[in-house]
Image (spheres, rainbow, N blue to C red):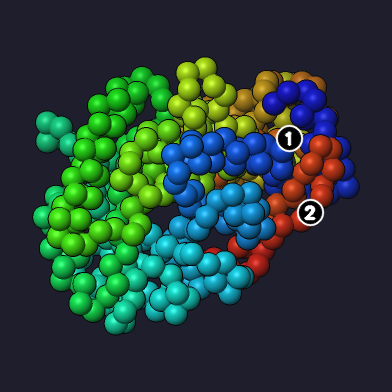
Amino acid sequence: MKTGDYERYRSALRGEPLPAAIVDLDAFDANLAAMLEPVRAAGKALRIATKSVRCPALIRRALEGGARGLMTYSAAETAFLAGQGFSDLLLAYPTMFPGEAVRAGAAVVIDCDQHAAALPDGAPVVIDVDVSYRVAGLHLGVRRSPLREPEEVVALARRIAGRLEFRGLLAYEAQIAGLADVGSARLLKRLSRPDVARRRARLDAALREAGLKPKIFNGGGSGSLASSCAEAVLTEVTAGSALLAGHLFDRMPSPSGRAGASGFRPALRFALEASRRPARGLVTCLGGGIIASGAPGRDRLPLPMAPLRLLPLEGAGEVQTPLEGAAGVELGAPVFFRPAKSGEPAERFNEYLLVRGDRVVERAPTYRGLGRAFLT
């Protein structure tokens, strides 16, 4: 963190109890603009992944700034957002208990006949398709839908067409969108991009030939906006993590895809109190164990402001986090961290303090602050 940023964030938090979480609105708006640039150039829509925000005021800000529609993650969350006045909802994670989402008017993602059977007549559905990269017996990507081949997708679409409203497809390329653009991951992404594009084109052609033209064809993520927008068959792309830009996104490609273009700006930070000094050059903060989901590793830990460093044998603790390189940090001062991922900190803070310059301009309740928790 730059010295100027530290001083203005510290000024913004003067008088605020710690811990606290802040969102820099200038960075948030800049990230949204960067995300929208390739989307608008390609004539597509940007759908916001609510799991990566979990704060109604920020979700609304993204929509008012040019995004269209929301990708939700649970039936209860979908109904909650509908009650908050949001529309164009796509529940992207299948459930055998979709009632609340259907009553809210959302389209619901399915990938098997059992999911379809759980829906009432006329419910709008989107079929989820696996576009992971497979080579030499390896499955490189996330484990989502069991559907992979066009004939499987067409068969399911035909079986449900008489009773449900077939809206289209969701085909998420996590092995491209969710990986840093470094090392072996860069090679995987380079090999996977043309494979994903071919698979999505084949799916679109097969459905059109069967008289089942998709109204929605959704793909993409914060780390694959440029490549996804280049695919003619996609009608929309989804992203959300880049709005707040957890530190896992520091090595993601530019949303524009232009070489040398700047990437996403850190927008979300949390501040802990420097509460004691156990030894020279060390300071211990109160709290701090906001560990990101995914395969365990140091990249899932929060990142303290430079030159502060986590201790390798302690990391970020549930109730205390010791840091080295802290000779100049006085007790009582706020110490700022960046979370690894964007959405999960909202489960730990009741509100986000929205900052412009060195002032808090709004206090925005998170789902937690509104008394709601949709997945544990």
Mark 1 burial class by Cα count in 10 Å: few <14, some 14-19, many 20+: many
Image vertical order of residue 247 relative to residue 294, above or below: above
Which residue occupies the extreme top position in the image?
260
Q: Position of residue 161 (x, y in %)?
A: 21, 72
The residue carrying mark 2 is 362
Residue 344 seen in the figure:
no
**Marks 2 and 1, the one that precedes in the sequence:** 1
Residue 120 seen in the figure:
yes
For the point 62% across and 25% down, the residue is 309
Depth check, mark 2 against mark 1: the one in front is: 2
Specify whether 202 is left or right of 339.
left
Q: Position of residue 322 (x, y in %)?
A: 65, 33
Which residue occupies the extreme bottom position in the image?
121
The residue carrying mark 1 is 335
Compare residues 235 and 357 and report the one nearer the observer. Answer: 235
- Three-letter amino acid code at the position of disc 1: Val
